[in-house]
């Protein structure tokens, strides 16, 4: 993946308190354009809060610090951000293709472009024959694929993913991870991917951000330049994996 | 067909026959008690035969209560549907607004809770005094009875909206208004339909009472007037007609609901 | 379900809203043409208090209340017992279902109020017809809910009990009945409000006392103040009955209460 040194996301001294409880503690880092960054940390260390703050959803206004995308403060109407949640978030009242088209409709793309994009996305995640199905008729992995297709469809500058494969079994996970890499390489989107699964982090990322326990801060940034396609049985792979695992153990 | 299926089918047939026999017994006993034994005078409890005769007579005759059966039905439907539609048109958007806009919720809910416990029937005398005996009073009464379930169900429907879905819309940059129309309202549709169904039921029920006390046409009126005329057979005709139309409404709305509420039952 | 946290913003809005309501009411009935038809809130409250010691018709207001309540409770009580028996029978026995369900389905769509004329012709304007009308109001709902409840009893539970050697009688009283209770209670709540409405309707049509009669009397004598007082009292009683039912349900069915 060609290294583009242009910085897309700049986070400076991000701090978040819920009342008196300090959750995120003065976090600063950069994300380069087109980079795939994974964020790992012990369970309950505030990873989701971390991600939510990046997009200022709902209650998650920063207590202090700033987040800049392309030099400007985060603004969801202006910046093209997509988010894939941990929970299944496809709209049950719409078909698969309507779901995938949702973001495009909100962003007011022209109709024919929407159709083309939707077909392309469905094809990339392998759901073309299910386009008229409703979410209640789909399996778990298919539901996540719908969310992924919907997220990529808007050609986002930044894609945030919060443990999207946490509830799937291993073989499905491997398959979806490969699909994700394919989509990422195809679109050049910047991805921040949260997971507690270290193997997944090592498999997907170009850089790994290791967080500490609450109050959350950055323990270490690890560059991951293993060549693709990656092999989980590779020696170098497992060496990196052990290195990260050691950082997470909290004794 | 295998053994099990055959046996099931036999059982079903057996029980259907039992049901049919039961109905026959019911009508039989009714007939015997009235036409044969004359346990009670005709004008108090008619026999099934008399009911059928009255029904046929009513199809064309306006005696003795001022309109043919269809005339009464039309009058009742007109009142019921007017009040119902008004109730729905005001109630559903109000419920949605109350659930979506916090300020409106805080202000309107206490007022709504004041009105809610008063049963619709208790409104009848007040409406008569305000509007007199006519379409206005009746429609107003039915409006109140349809209005309440519509508001409650629309409110509950919007409140059910999943935060995740709202967040999805938000990340795509949707405005608050877009979130209301593309996420909240679609989520609420099943419950809104339930509200519409329930309020049609209550509207139809209240209609009876309204017409008994404040009308000179309609099925409820038919029941009331024929009591003073001691024509129990016509009363029964009216009762059965009311029941039948009520059933048609329920079945109709259920079918509409299946067609328009997409996504099927959630889960 | 609402949390019991004290929310100052909510209370302020509620107080303001209700105050606005009363002010508007008072304003309309003092300064606009409406004042010729509608009493102002103070007159209504005055009559409300007076009615506790000045009789309306033959009784003070509490007397009327008790009369109406008596009618409801008798009709409701009897109908509930019958309804539970029939409902559970239909739900557990295919024979009972085949015999009784068709008749039930035939009569069910007829609203209780539509029965008033027939019942009065048959039984007169005495107490019996009031009881019967309240009963009809309650019966359909209770039966239907008992029926659904009995149908949905977990067959595994019954099978378990049978396997452990429980007698059929005990299975009914200790497995089926408790299983159905939440469903039955839901039906009873609706049934109670239907009964309450039925008694009002019956009293408005043919009675000498009771809340419904009171309102009708107000209507007949063009005494809107009385009508409004009646409505307030009826609303309060309705609320009380509903709260009472919920409290009883919580006691009996505490294992089934879903939070949130």
Image (cartoon, coloured by chain):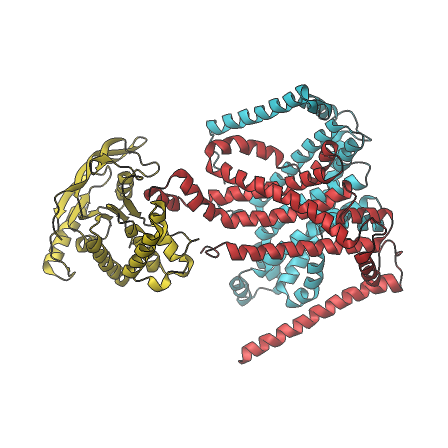
Chain colours: A yellow, B red, C cyan
Which of the 4 image quarters holds residue A63?
Answer: top left
Return the residue nearer the eye: A155 or A239. A155
Choose between B61 and B244: the one closer to the eye: B61
Q: In the picture shown, does residue B186 fall above or below B58?
A: above
Looking at the image, residue C35 lies above or below residue A16 = above
Q: Nearer the viewer, residue C56 or C150?
A: C56
Label tally: 0
Position of residue B62 measured from the top left corner of the image (x, y, whole percent) = 83, 52
Answer left or right for B167 relative to A80.
right
Question: For this view, does B89 lie left or right of residue A98?
Answer: right
Relative to residue B263, is residue B164 drawn left or right? left
Q: Find residue A45 and report its horizontal and vertical position in percent.
A: 25, 42
Taking the image as drawn, is residue C260 in sight? no
Above or below, comparing residue B232 to residue A25 in the picture: below
The percent position of residue B44, horizontal first and vertical second, equals 86, 53
- Figure quadrant of residue B122: top right
Q: Residue at x 24, y 59 (%)?
A: A179
Name the image quarter holding residue C94: bottom right
Q: Residue at the spot x=53%, y=80% of the render?
A: B2
For residue C128, say whether it is visible.
yes
Above or below, C83 relative to B142:
below
**What residue lies at 39% left-to-right and 46% top-to-bottom?**
B165
Question: Whole-percent x and y of residue A217?
Answer: 20, 38
């Amino acid at each position: 993946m060609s290294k583009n040194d242009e910085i897309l996301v700049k986070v400076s001294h991000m701090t978040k308190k819920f009342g008196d409880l300090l959750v995120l503690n003065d976090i600063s880092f950069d994300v380069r354009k087109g980079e795939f960054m994974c964020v790992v940390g012990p369970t309950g260390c505030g990873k989701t809060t971390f991600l939510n703050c990046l997009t200022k959803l709902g209650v998650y206004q920063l207590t202090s610090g700033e987040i800049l995308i392309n030099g400007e403060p985060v603004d969801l109407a202006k910046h093209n951000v997509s988010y894939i949640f941990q929970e299944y978030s496809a709209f049950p009242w719409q078909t698969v293709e309507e779901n995938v088209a949702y973001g495009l409709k909100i962003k007011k793309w022209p109709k024919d472009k929407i159709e083309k994009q939707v077909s392309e996305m469905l094809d990339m995640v392998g759901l073309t024959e299910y386009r008229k199905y409703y979410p209640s008729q789909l399996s778990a992995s298919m539901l996540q694929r719908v969310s992924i297709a919907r997220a990529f469809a808007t050609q986002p500058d930044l894609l945030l993913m919060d443990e999207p494969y946490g509830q799937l079994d291993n073989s499905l996970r491997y398959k979806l991870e490969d699909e994700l890499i394919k989509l990422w390489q195809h679109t050049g989107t910047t991805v921040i991917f949260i997971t507690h699964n270290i193997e997944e982090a090592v498999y997907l990322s170009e850089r790994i951000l290791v967080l500490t326990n609450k109050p959350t801060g950055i323990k270490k940034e690890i560059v991951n330049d293993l060549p693709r396609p990656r092999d989980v049985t590779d020696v170098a792979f497992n060496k990196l994996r052990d290195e990260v695992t050691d950082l997470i153990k909290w004794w | 067909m295998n053994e099990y299926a055959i046996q099931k089918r036999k059982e079903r047939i057996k029980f259907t026959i039992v049901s049919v026999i039961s109905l026959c017994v019911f009508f039989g006993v009714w007939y015997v008690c009235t036409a044969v034994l004359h346990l009670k005078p005709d004008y108090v409890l008619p026999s099934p035969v008399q009911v059928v005769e009255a029904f046929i007579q009513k199809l064309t005759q306006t005696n003795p209560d001022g309109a043919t059966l269809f005339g009464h039905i039309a009058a009742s439907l007109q009142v019921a549907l007017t009040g119902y539609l008004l109730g729905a048109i005001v109630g559903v958007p109000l419920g949605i607004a109350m659930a979506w806009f916090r300020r409106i919720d805080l202000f309107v809910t206490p007022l709504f809770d004041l009105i809610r416990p008063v049963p619709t029937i208790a409104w009848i005398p007040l409406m008569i005094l305000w509007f007199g005996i006519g379409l206005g009073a009746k429609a107003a009464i039915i409006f109140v009875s349809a209005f309440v379930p519509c508001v409650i169900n629309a409110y509950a429907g919007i409140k059910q909206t999943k935060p995740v879905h709202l967040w999805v819309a938000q990340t795509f940059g949707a405005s608050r208004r877009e979130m209301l129309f593309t996420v909240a309202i679609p989520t609420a549709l099943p419950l809104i339909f339930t509200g519409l169904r329930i309020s049609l039921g209550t509207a139809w029920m209240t209609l009876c009472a309204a017409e008994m006390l404040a009308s000179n046409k309609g099925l409820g009126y038919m029941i009331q007037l024929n009591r003073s005329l001691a024509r129990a057979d016509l009363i029964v005709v009216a009762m059965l007609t009311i029941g039948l139309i009520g059933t048609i409404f329920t079945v109709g709305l259920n079918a509409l609901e299946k067609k328009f509420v997409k996504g099927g039952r959630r889960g | 379900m609402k949390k019991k946290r004290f929310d100052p913003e909510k209370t302020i809005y509620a107080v303001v809203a209700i105050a606005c309501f009363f002010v508007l009411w008072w304003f309309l009935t003092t300064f606009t043409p409406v004042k010729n038809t509608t009493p102002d809130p103070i007159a209504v409250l005055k009559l409300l208090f007076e009615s506790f010691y000045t009789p309306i018709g033959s009784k003070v207001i509490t007397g009327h209340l008790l009369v109406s309540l008596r009618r409801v409770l008798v009709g409701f009580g009897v109908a509930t017992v019958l309804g539970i028996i029939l409902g559970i029978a239909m739900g557990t026995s295919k024979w009972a279902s085949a015999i009784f369900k068709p008749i039930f389905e035939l009569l069910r769509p007829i609203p209780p109020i539509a029965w008033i004329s027939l019942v009065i012709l048959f039984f007169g304007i005495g107490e019996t017809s009031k009881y019967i009308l309240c009963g009809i109001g309650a019966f359909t709902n209770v039966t239907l809910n008992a029926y659904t409840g009995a149908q949905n009893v977990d067959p595994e539970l019954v099978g378990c009990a049978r396997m452990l050697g429980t007698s059929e009688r005990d299975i009914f009283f200790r497995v089926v009945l408790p299983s159905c209770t939440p469903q039955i209670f839901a039906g009873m709540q609706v049934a109670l409000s239907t009964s309450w409405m039925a008694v009002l309707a019956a009293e408005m049509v043919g009675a000498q006392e009771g809340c419904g009669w009171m309102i009708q009397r107000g209507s007949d004598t063009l005494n809107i103040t009385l009508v409004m007082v009646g409505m307030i009292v009826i609303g309060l009683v309705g609320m009380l009955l509903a709260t009472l039912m919920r409290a009883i349900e919580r006691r009996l069915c505490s294992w089934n209460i879903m939070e949130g």
